[in-house]
Image: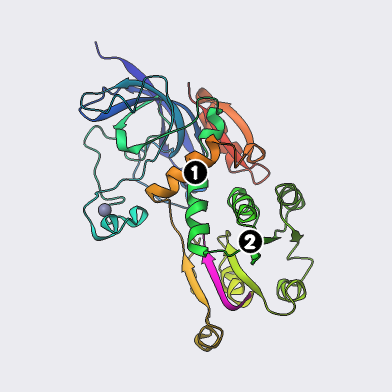
Amino acid sequence: MTAKMRVAVFKDKGQVEIQEVEKPVPSKGEILVKIEACALCTWEQRIFKGISHVPFPFIGGHEVSGTIAEIGEEVNNERWKVGQKVAVRLLENCYECYYCRKGEHNLCEMIGKQKNQRDKFAGPRGLSEYLSISSDKLFKLDNSLDFEVGALTEPLACVIHSVERAEIEIGDDVLIIGAGVMGLFHTMMCKKRAARVIVSEVDDKRRDLAKVLGADEVFNPVEENSIEKIKQLTEGRGADIVINTTAISKVAQEAIQLVGKMGKVVFYSSQHPDNPINISPDRIHNDEITITGTVSPSISDFQKSAKLLSTKIISPEPLISKVIPFENVQKAFEEAINPENFRVIVKIN
Ligand SMILES: [Zn+2]
Ligand SMILES: [Zn+2]
């Protein structure tokens, strides 16, 4: 008889339930990871709310940490040992396309195109008790690290990618729009780059936490005019870097107005809905402005993230609002979409 394990299956929007499936057995080159914690990302929250669409039945979860339970054949068993804590990078890579070969693994042409042959479920499958995966997808975490913190390796890696794209220089005025989990991770990372961090956020509680995590200036864009506020803080220049972590088109447009000469605007968040915005090409020309985006983490960003968490250079505990047992996964999603909460983590095992 084959062993069974539990997975959390999205049956439809707003409906997640625990089901039993066959426990995977590691094939050649694979490692069996016992997943301990899975954080519920904004993407999965949008699937739950029906804003982002996926084929059902679907097993979500891509922010995971766990321990190595079993090592398959032909895995480097000097490097990988049973009991090692790990984070898992669940983004697919072909290692053959133009972008993979340039080292830009987050832009792989095969992302979202590789078909799961194993069973009827689509999705990254982090909300499972076990995952059998190629050893190159694993990143060591220090064995003293809490699994809940380890589960944040992926979101921190996304922010590391963004901060690298922004090419922040020491002392730059960096405006971060929005102080949800992503805005707050940006706050911590930009402080590590010795930037002067200004955070724009409507919610009092989030603004307070931004301050605690090191923001130099915070303001409420409903109470204060953002353009005037940024001018006042930067001797009329505008910010050197503006990072938009919100999904609001109006804010995306304003982000460009808030940047100064030689400035850079980073569109971090995906947009819902993706409304076109107005840009003055002449302003981009005259002020030598760069507008860029950032999506997902590359392999090196993941490596850096696992290191920053393992060495406690970044301590994201304040971003964890709730830890909820696996059997209450439906409740975990309901908590995750509550704007009062930062990250909600499902304790799997
Ligand atoms: Zn994520
Ligand atoms: Zn590729």
Q: Is residue 301 left or right of residue 185?
A: left
Residue 170 within the magenta-colored segment of the rendering: no
Residue assigned mark 1: 305
The residues tagged by marks 1 and 2 sit, at their Cα atoms, a distance apart of: 20 Å
Residue at point 49%, 43% (across, down): 305
Type of the residue with mark 2: Ile
Q: Label 1: few (<14), some or many (≥20) within 10 Å? A: many
Q: Is residue 339 above or below residue 285?
A: above
Q: Looking at the magenta stretch, what is its main secondary structure? A: strand
* Image x and y of residue 85, in percent: 45, 26
Q: Is residue 312 left or right of residue 29?
A: right
Q: Which residues are magenta?
A: 259-268
Q: Nearer the viewer, residue 201 or 141?
A: 141
Disc nearer the start of the sequence (1/2): 2
Instruction: Inspect this view and state whether residue 44 appears.
Output: no
Residue at point 53%, 35% (across, down): 310
Type of the residue with mark 1: Ser
Instruction: Inspect this view and state whether residue 32 appears.
Output: yes
Quadrant (top left/top right/bottom left/bottom right) for the N terminus: top left
Residue assigned mark 2: 176
Residue at point 75%, 65% (across, down): 222
* Image x and y of residue 345, in percent: 55, 33
* Image x and y of residue 338, in percent: 63, 43
Q: Is residue 89 left or right of residue 230?
A: left
